[in-house]
Image: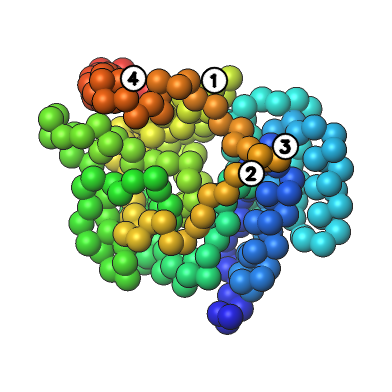
Amino acid sequence: MTAPQHFKDITLLITHYNRSSSLERLLATFRQLQVSFEAIVVSDDGSQSEHLAYIAELTKTYPFTLVTAAKNSGLGNNINKGQDAVRTPYTVYVQEDFVPSSLFSGRLLDAWQFMEDDASLDVVRFYAYFRYPSLKPFKNGFSEMRFKPLAIFNTYRKFYFYSDHPHLRRSNFFNKFGRYKEGVKGDVTEYKMMMSFLKNKARGLFYDDFTTLFEQRNSSDEPSTMHRRSYKNSTNVFISFVRHVFRHVKFNINYYLVKL
């Protein structure tokens, strides 16, 4: 068991929708790991009544602020209103279906110190589905993400500088990057913020061993609430090639020609 660690400058922001058992697991794991924050904000996106009732019971065990919504308004609205409730200089953003490992506390301490030492750093990423394609070694197992816009024949994955996966950011990042786009699908919200990060010259770090600090868990009882069309995830060789070309062209056009 690692030593207790309290992060007085950091609020844990958790977005939630109809997965109260997953939320409980996340909160319980942080407690088991003896990792605590100055505050915890749970932003709910209009969950069903049974989940809201369960969350009300959780507040008796875990100290957190619940930010509710009258109706389901999408990912952008859910993150925006949750971030508005944060009062500390830094925010750790985690969706409710993630589970931290025992390694996370030490790496979060590193990330916080990096951002304290360098005011130009905007984000430190802890988890990803794939390695960011252009990295410069930094320290303590982290690398700096280097976006190279003029490398036009490079993989389109270079555009995935921002991600909704677990990360540490400055709580005033709206001032530089704007608020999350509301009234659109979740993947569009994430894409718009990704483009804002790139166009506003964000600086960020990426944890090299990116699958070791968090695990994403979904079950049949509480499946993922993000649904994408089948062609977006297809492994068919032809579809994958067409998807690669389409994204490469689309991302470059949006980066160079489309205003935020």
Is there any visible trace of residue 88 in the rendered image? no
Query: For the point 29% across and 40% down, which residue is it?
Result: 201
Question: Which amino acid is tagged 1?
Answer: Val
Query: For the point 58% across and 68% down, which residue is it?
Result: 7
Secondary structure at numbered mark 2: loop
Residue 18 tag number:
3
What is the distance, in whole Å, between disc 1 and disc 3 at their CAs? Answer: 19 Å
Secondary structure at numbered mark 3: loop
Residue 184 tag number:
1
Query: For the point 82% across and 55% down, which residue is it?
Result: 59
Q: Could you say which is closer to the camera, residue 176 or residue 150?
A: 150
Secondary structure at numbered mark 1: loop
Q: Could you say which is closer to the camera, residue 195 or residue 134?
A: 134
What is the distance, in whole Å, between disc 1 and disc 2 at their CAs? Answer: 26 Å
What is the distance, in whole Å, between disc 3 and disc 2 at their CAs? Answer: 13 Å
The quarter of the picture where residue 259 lies is top left
Which quarter of the image is occupied by the C terminus? Answer: top left
Question: Which amino acid is tagged 3?
Answer: Asn
Please state if 229 lies on the left or on the right of 71 as rendered: left
Secondary structure at numbered mark 4: loop
- Nearer to us: label 4 or label 1: 1
Question: Which amino acid is tagged 4?
Answer: Lys
Question: Which amino acid is tagged 2?
Answer: Ser
Which badge, 1 or 2, comes first in the chain's sequence? 1
Residue 219 tag number:
2
Which quarter of the image is occupied by the N terminus? Answer: bottom right
State the residue position of label 4: 259
Q: Position of residue 111 (x, y in %)?
A: 42, 64
What is the distance, in whole Å, between disc 4 and disc 1 at their CAs? Answer: 17 Å
